[in-house]
Image (tube, rainbow, N blue to C red):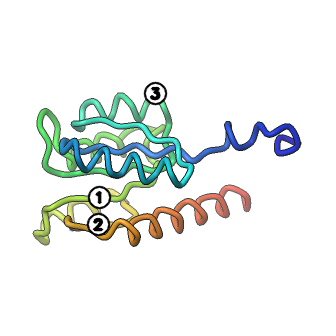
Amino acid sequence: MFDFFGLCKKTCKTKILVIDDEPNIVQTLKDRLEMNEYMVFTADNGQEGLKVARQESPDLVLLDVIMPIMDGHEMLEQLRRQEWGRQISVIMLTARSQAQDIARARACDIEDYIIKPFDLSELLEKIENIVERNKTMVASR
């Protein structure tokens, strides 16, 4: 019914929160995601990212590790402590490639851990796969 009125396109967009302190990465991701019809929110540190996540309830978070104020690991751990934050999908997108960083993130139930520099096409494909899987899971409930 919503599609008939053209409302679903406006109200059913997947929300993605990009949290990174590098403005050029944030802008590139925002532009490409919006071109692919995602609704994009941004934050430049983990503390701000938590606030935006609570307000906007994103479907997916792209999260850097190395940031001022609150790093990505701490933000992820705090997100997972919140009832509202446990079901949000997270992809870590970071220059940190040490095994302990990857293990710490995976312990918080992330979807993927991608090391910068990254291939934007591959990232978009991973995002689409996560979005489709999540839609299927919701529909089967």
Asked if labels 2 and 1 touch by Cβ distance under 8 angstroms, the answer is yes
Sooner in the amino-acid sequence: mark 1 or mark 2? 1
Q: Whole-percent x and y of residue 12?
A: 67, 43
Q: Which residue is mark 2?
A: 113
Q: Element under label 3?
A: helix
Residue at 74%, 42% in the rendered image: 8
Quadrant (top left, top right, bottom left, bottom right) of the C terminus: bottom right
How far is mark 2 from mark 3, CA to CA? Answer: 25 Å
Q: Element under label 2?
A: strand
Residue at 56%, 49% in the rendered image: 37
| Residue 76 in view in this figure | yes
Given the image, on which type of amino acid does mark 1 rest?
A: Met
Q: Which disc is residue 92 wearing?
A: 1
How far is mark 3 from mark 1, CA to CA? Answer: 21 Å
Given the image, on which type of amino acid does mark 3 rest?
A: Gln
Given the image, on which type of amino acid does mark 2 rest?
A: Tyr
Q: Which residue is mark 3?
A: 55
